[in-house]
Image (cartoon, grey):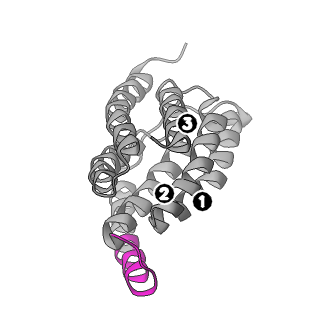
């Protein structure tokens, strides 16, 4: 058992649980997790995931700030939804980005599963951006990413990380339900 992977797993579970609860400490906790996963994915030759986690560092810093000050009059941000047209735009961006990044990774690296790795990378970036914007639909993207990631990490022998993504799948389902309640709850 790899202690770095185990530590990252624990911080990942805590971070996503805090996102589900819409608690601001999700961001610094997530920073610890993603920093550790940069090293884990480098070792596993999952370069797209490694690059993703480097980008996460910046997105987590943005999300932390935006959740605190992105609402009306610089107040805390509320959960909202995307317009239908925007949803289709994000899906198209994910598909196009997956094809482009997968081609690049297949052609220029020794990536193990370039297109699947590219999908989890691009879809995760979309999901993380939407999470930072507190959009309900972020959870739909996370659900799909989690299902695909479970298969990839199992295939690569990252069994602790596979378990983490099983937990993430459960938490994403819970997050979708909790954030939906937050939208339906009247503001007092």
Residue sitting at x 34%, y 76%: 99
Magenta residues: mostly which secondary structure?
A: helix
Pick the quarter of the image with the C terminus. Answer: top right
Question: Is disc 3 placed on a helix, strand or loop?
Answer: helix
- Nearer to us of marks 3 and 1 is 3
**Residue 109 is a magenta residue:** yes
Proximity of marks 2 and 1: CB atoms separated by less than 8 Å: yes
Residue sitting at x 67%, y 39%: 64
- Nearer to us of marks 2 and 3 is 3
Residue 101, by quadrant, is bottom left
* Residue 70 visible in this rendered orientation of the protein: no
Q: Which residue is label 2 attached to?
A: 125
Label number found at residue 55: 1
Q: From what the image shows, is residue 136 above or below residue 47?
A: above
Q: From what the image shows, is residue 169 above or below residue 115?
A: above
Residue 109, by quadrant, is bottom left
Q: Which residue is label 3 attached to?
A: 7
Q: Which residues are magenta?
A: 97-112
Counting residues from the start of the chain, the first of labels 2 and 3 encountered is 3
Q: Residues within 10 Å of mark 2 (few under 14, many from 20)?
A: many
Question: Is disc 1 placed on a helix, strand or loop?
Answer: helix
Question: Which residue is nearer to you in this view: 5 or 26?
Answer: 5
Counting residues from the start of the chain, the first of labels 3 and 1 encountered is 3
Label number found at residue 86: none
Residue at the front extreme, as displayed: 1
Q: Give the distance between the C-alpha atoms of the residues marked 2 and 1, in whole angstroms.
A: 8 Å
User: Percent x, y for residue 151?
Assistant: 26, 52
């Amino acid at each position: 058992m790899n202690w770095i992977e185990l530590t990252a797993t624990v911080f990942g579970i805590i971070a996503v649980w805090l996102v589900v609860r819409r608690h601001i400490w999700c961001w610094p906790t997530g920073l610890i997790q993603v920093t550790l996963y940069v090293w884990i994915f480098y070792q596993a030759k999952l370069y797209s995931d490694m690059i993703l986690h480097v980008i996460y560092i910046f997105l987590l810093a943005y999300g932390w700030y935006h959740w605190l000050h992105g609402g009306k009059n610089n107040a805390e941000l509320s959960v909202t939804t995307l317009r239908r047209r925007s949803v289709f735009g994000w899906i198209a961006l994910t598909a196009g980005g997956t094809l482009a990044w997968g081609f690049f990774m297949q052609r220029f690296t020794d990536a193990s599963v370039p297109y699947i790795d590219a999908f989890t990378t691009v879809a995760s970036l979309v999901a993380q951006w939407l999470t930072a914007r507190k959009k309900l639909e972020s959870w739909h993207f996370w659900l799909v990413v989690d299902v695909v990631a479970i298969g990839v990490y199992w295939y690569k022998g990252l069994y602790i990380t596979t378990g983490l993504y099983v937990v993430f799948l459960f938490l994403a389902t819970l997050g979708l339900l909790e954030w939906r309640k937050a939208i339906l709850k009247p503001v007092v």
